[in-house]
Amino acid sequence: MHDGFSGRYEVFFYCNAAAFAASLVLIILLLSKSVTNQRMWLHSMQLTMTLDLFSLLGAYAAGSCRTLKSSIYILVLVLAVIIYVGIHTLVSTRFIPRELKQNLQTMINSVLNQRSSLGRQESIPLEKAVQEARKFILTLVIFAATITYQAGLNPPGGFWAENDHGSNKVHMAFPPYKHHPGTSVLRTNYLGRYNIFIISNSTSFVASLVIIILILSPKLSGHGIRTKAVIVCVVVDLLCLIAAYAAGCCREVAT
């Protein structure tokens, strides 16, 4: 990749290194209880976490594919996540009038109260149920994000390492390959399966990051679970994992 796609390699390297460094900084901050109790450090942690997620998106977009056509879908997903986070950032700042925020919050609460009126008689408090759901789903999506990130950077079949048959004697007897080194073997031989794999795997990866954003935001997690937004994203995440596995693990239709 460094020789054949130097531009993509540099984007991948710096984004991946930034995500790695941001993760280590977050671990150090989270291990200090005195730091997490201060508002300034909490804002710094939120900024570092946002940098971490976007760096992961950039590294995945640059390293999971080589051609522009294959990158369009991933770039669209990344742009959607950026817009999504940007909207919530604007809502949480002073750019939005306070009266509009209160009206929106009142409308959302009324809708949620109507939908959850049947479940108010449950013995388990809503806050405890939300906390348990957050822990369970967060554990699930961390594993899903890790798996899909690794699968995107190492697709089934690997990559073409060279453009000839190896030794000079064999090269004299056979024509060279018509494959660019660093491109996916699965894409060369099974374009349809590769497209299904990369689309499903990318959707699962981005869905996992969106779920992490929802879960780690105290204002969004409760509403997200009660409105089934998080559950829908989890279902999409799992279905895309199944589709990516089915497209990438075998080559025959019957299998």
Image (cartoon, helix red, strand yellow):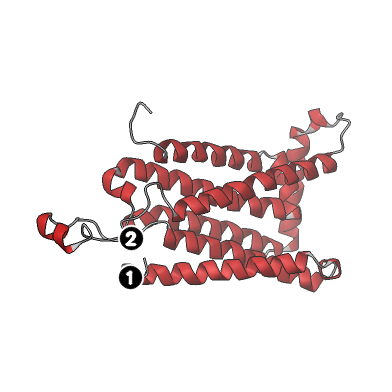
Of residue 210 and residue 183, the one placed in the foreground of this image is: 183
**Residue 195 screen position, x and y as percent:** 36, 45
Q: Residue furthest right?
A: 123
CA separation in Å, label 1 and label 2: 9 Å
| Residue wearing tag 2 | 182
Q: Locate the N terminus by quadrant.
A: bottom left
Q: Residue at x 39, y 42 (%)?
A: 196
Q: Residue at x 51, y 40 (%)?
A: 241
Mark 1 surroundings: few (<14), some (14-19) or many (≥20) residues within 10 A: few
**Residue 21 screen position, x and y as percent:** 62, 70
Q: Locate the C terminus by quadrant.
A: top left
Which mark, by number, is residue 46? none
Q: Residue at x 10, y 55 (%)?
A: 173
Which type of secondary structure does the marked residue at label 2 adopt?
A: loop
Of residue 165 and residue 3, the one placed in the foreground of this image is: 165
Of residue 177 and residue 217, the one placed in the foreground of this image is: 177
